């Protein structure tokens, strides 16, 4: 009962992801995105709570006021799809379960705190770098953008440099 | 000749349908790869499971080669594709910060969405953190606007331009580099597998 399937061979999964990325370039002329949709939805939520604040923020104005409906953008439609696709794959593999994934030696509460903290740091970095592992590293990487390759190596450098200090979280 | 203009031929609604479908395929591939689980992602940075590197670089060289060949055979106009503009210093600084957040939180934005989709509470909280971090960036950007806009701003800049080589040579070199990394990744995994066996 409830047997969990093993993950796909990483090279095969990579080919599948690469074909999806290529299809995106053929269909739309650009690659994949994940962080942009999160930024739009997060920005729209802030705007809903404090619309007056939006007008004082150059970031929110350019994020939300460039079109009539800031959520009517491919970035949002694509991440809706990502959630649906992730759910389908998870259901087929028996991996959909309300749980907290964590290293073997930390509590659920500690994991929650560091998940939020890591998200905050990543969210800041993603906007500073104008993109994430999807929109910069994968998409920009495939079309040989110099800045995207620099970003990608910086991500690995930052993660490896930090790994030692948070080793207790994962090992 | 592609890229296609779905909005012009089928309309805005259909274009959005295609975006959702592309997202579905994207999310499906990420979950299949094991990227809905923070432990698989974090393992990359302790050299125990090089899944992240293998999937990422296989995806990049697959898409890169398909684009290169499709362009060569006149099926795709590579010059019409969006190339991320190079803002070198904000990109590197942002990448370093991103990498720190990646190993602290265990996800990147796309993988966190897949984790959230499969009901992982840590994935949901990471996405909440993302929203907060983006808000904080928005609040602080005015203080570093000049740096963000101008530092290392080279516009559209590609590796063939930087290296002064033909695209075909850079494509070839990237494939060779990826293959060397895969070879190294397999060796590192074997080393840790043996070491763990010895300990038990």
Image (spheres, coloured by chain):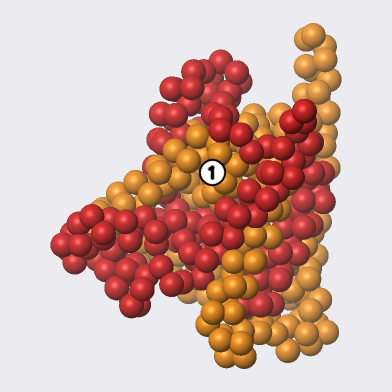
Q: Of B137 and A87, which appears nearest the observer?
A: A87
Residue B170: image x %, image y %? 74, 67
Identify the image quadrant of residue A95.
top right
Residue placed under numbered mark 1 in the picture: B116
Q: Of B35 and A118, which appears nearest the observer?
A: B35
Circle 1 Cα neighbour tier, 10 Å, few/some/many (<14 / 14–19 / ≥20)? many
* A89 lies above or below B11: above
Residue A114: image x %, image y %? 44, 30
* B195 lies above or below B29: above
Q: Chain A is shown in which shade?
A: red
Chain rendered orange: B
Q: Of A83 and B64, which appears nearest the observer?
A: A83
* A108 lies above or below A150: above
Classify mark 1: helix, strand or loop: helix
Residue B136: image x %, image y %? 30, 49
**Residue in the picture at 50% in, 34% down:** B122
| Outermost residue toward the top in this view | B200
Residue B57: image x %, image y %? 72, 53
Total number of numbered discs in the rendering: 1
The quadrant of the picture occupied by the C terminus of chain B is: top right
Identify the image quadrant of residue B138.
bottom left
**Residue in the picture at 69% in, 77% down:** A26
The quadrant of the picture occupied by the N terminus of chain B is: bottom right
Chain on which label 1 sits: B
**Residue in the picture at 29% in, 63% down:** A59
| Outermost residue toward the front in this view | A1
Residue B8 shows in this picture: yes
**Left or right, residue A76 beside residue A90:** left
**Residue in the picture at 83% in, 84% down:** B73
Residue B57 shows in this picture: no
């Amino acid at each position: 009962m409830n047997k969990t399937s093993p993950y796909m061979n990483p090279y095969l999964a990579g080919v599948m992801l690469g074909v999806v990325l290529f299809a995106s370039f053929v269909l739309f002329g650009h690659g994949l995105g994940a962080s942009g949709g999160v930024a739009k939805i997060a920005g729209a939520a802030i705007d809903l709570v404090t619309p007056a604040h939006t007008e004082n923020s150059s970031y929110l104005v350019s994020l939300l006021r460039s079109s009539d409906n800031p959520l009517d953008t491919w970035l949002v439609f694509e991440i809706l799809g990502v959630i649906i696709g992730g759910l389908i794959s998870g259901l087929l593999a028996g991996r959909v379960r309300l749980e907290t994934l964590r290293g073997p030696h930390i509590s659920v509460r500690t994991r929650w705190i560091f998940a939020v903290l890591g998200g905050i740091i990543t969210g800041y970095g993603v906007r500073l770098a104008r993109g994430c592992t999807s929109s910069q590293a994968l998409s920009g990487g495939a079309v040989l953008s110099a800045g995207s390759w620099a970003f990608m190596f910086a991500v690995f450098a930052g993660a490896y440099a930090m790994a030692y200090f948070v080793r207790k979280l994962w090992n | 000749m592609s890229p296609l203009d779905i909005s012009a031929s089928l309309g805005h609604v259909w274009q959005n349908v295609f975006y959702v479908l592309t997202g579905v395929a994207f999310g499906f591939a990420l979950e299949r790869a094991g990227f809905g689980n923070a432990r698989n992602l974090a393992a990359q940075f302790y050299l125990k499971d090089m899944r992240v590197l293998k999937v990422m670089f296989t995806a990049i060289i697959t898409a890169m080669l398909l684009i290169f060949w499709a362009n060569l055979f006149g099926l795709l106009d590579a010059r019409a594709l969006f190339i991320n503009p190079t803002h070198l210093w904000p990109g590197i600084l942002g990448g370093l910060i991103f990498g720190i957040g990646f190993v602290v939180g265990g996800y990147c934005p796309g993988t966190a969405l897949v984790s959230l989709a499969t009901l992982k509470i840590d994935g949901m909280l990471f996405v909440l953190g993302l929203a907060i971090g983006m808000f904080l960036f928005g609040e602080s950007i005015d203080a570093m606007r000049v740096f963000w806009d101008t530092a290392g701003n080279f516009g559209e800049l590609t590796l063939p331009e930087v290296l002064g080589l033909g695209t075909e040579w850079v494509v070839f070199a990237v494939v060779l580099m990826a293959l060397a990394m895969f070879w190294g990744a397999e060796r590192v995994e074997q080393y840790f597998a043996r070491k763990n066996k010895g300990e038990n």
